[in-house]
Image (spheres, rainbow, N blue to C red):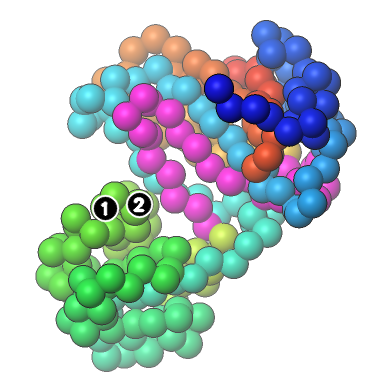
Amino acid sequence: MRKHSKRYRAAAGKRDRRAALPLAEALALLKGMPAARFDETVEIALKLGIDPKQSDQMVRGAIALPKGIGKKKRVIVFAEGDKAEEALAAGAQAAGGPELAKKIEDGWLDFDVAIAVPAAMRFVGKLGKVLGPKGKMPSPKAGTVTDNVGLAVREFTAGKIEFRTDAGGNVHGPMGKKSFPVEDLRLNIEAFLGHVKSLRPPAAKGNYIENVSLSTTMGPGIRVQVPG
C-alpha cells in the first residue's frame, strides 16, 4: 500500500472526502492546503456519463483557457514550404515533412504537441502507433490538423490544452498553477466545464457530467459540485 507524505496527510485532513463543495469553496480549500516545494499544477478530473466503448460517445477536444496554464508547450508542425515557414515564425520548434516524420520514427519525441496541415497527413498517418499512445497524434477534433498553422502554433505554445476520454469515461486536464489567483483558476475551470458540456454526444443518456474533482500535483482530490 502506498504511504503518503506527512504534507499530503495534512492536506487530506482538511477535506471531507464525501462532501462536494461549490467551486469557490473548493478552490479556497485547495489554495489553503500545505504547499509543496514547487508550484504545483491544478488538475481537474471529470467522470462522464458515457459508454467509452462506443465510438459515437467519445469526447475529445481542445481549448485555449482564458488565463493559460502557466506553462509554454513545445510544438512541432508537419508542413512544407510557406506553411513550414509560417509555423516556425509563430514559434514552432520544428517544422517539416517526410524528414520530420522519419526523425520521429527513429525515436525523437521531445515535444508536447504535433500539428499538421491537411496536405501533410500523408506523412503523419504511419506515425499513429508512435504518436497515438502518447496522445500526440494530430486530429481535426483536437484542432491540431489545420491550415491555419500560425494561429494553432501560437495557441498551443501559450498553453492550449487537448483532452479526450480515457477507457473509464474520464476526462483530465491542467487548469493552471496553484500560485494563480483564485479568480483565474475559476475562470479557467468554468471555461473548461462549459466546453466539455458543449461536446456532449447525442448518444449519451442520463447525467452527462457525473463527478468533478480538483487536485494539485502532489495533493488529494477535492470533490466539486457538478454544475447545472
Q: Decide: marks 1, 2 in contact (CB < 8 A)?
A: yes
Q: Residue at x 66, y 34 (%)?
A: 215
Residue marked by disc 1: 132
In the rendered image, the vertical position of residue 210 relative to residue 101, given as above or below: above
Q: Position of residue 87 (x, y in %)?
A: 41, 81
Q: Quadrant of residue 131?
A: bottom left
Q: Residue at x 82, y 26 (%)?
A: 10
Q: Position of residue 218 (x, y in %)?
A: 68, 40
Q: Position of residue 6 (x, y in %)?
A: 79, 31
Q: Is residue 118 toward the left or the right of residue 68 in the image?
A: left
In the rendered image, the vertical position of residue 210 relative to residue 65, given as above or below: above
Q: Quadrant of residue 110?
A: bottom left
Q: Amino acid at mark 2?
A: Gly
Q: Is residue 147 visible?
A: no
Q: Is residue 46 visible?
A: yes
Q: Nearer the viewer, residue 16 or 24?
A: 16
Q: Residues within 10 Å of mark 1 (few under 14, many from 20)?
A: few
Residue marked by disc 2: 135
Q: Residue at x 19, y 55 (%)?
A: 129
Image: magenta residue range: 160-185
Tell me if residue 24 is in the magenta stretch.
no
Q: Is residue 203 toward the left or the right of residue 22 in the image?
A: left
In the rendered image, the vertical position of residue 109 relative to residue 24, given as above or below: below
Q: Amino acid at mark 1?
A: Gly
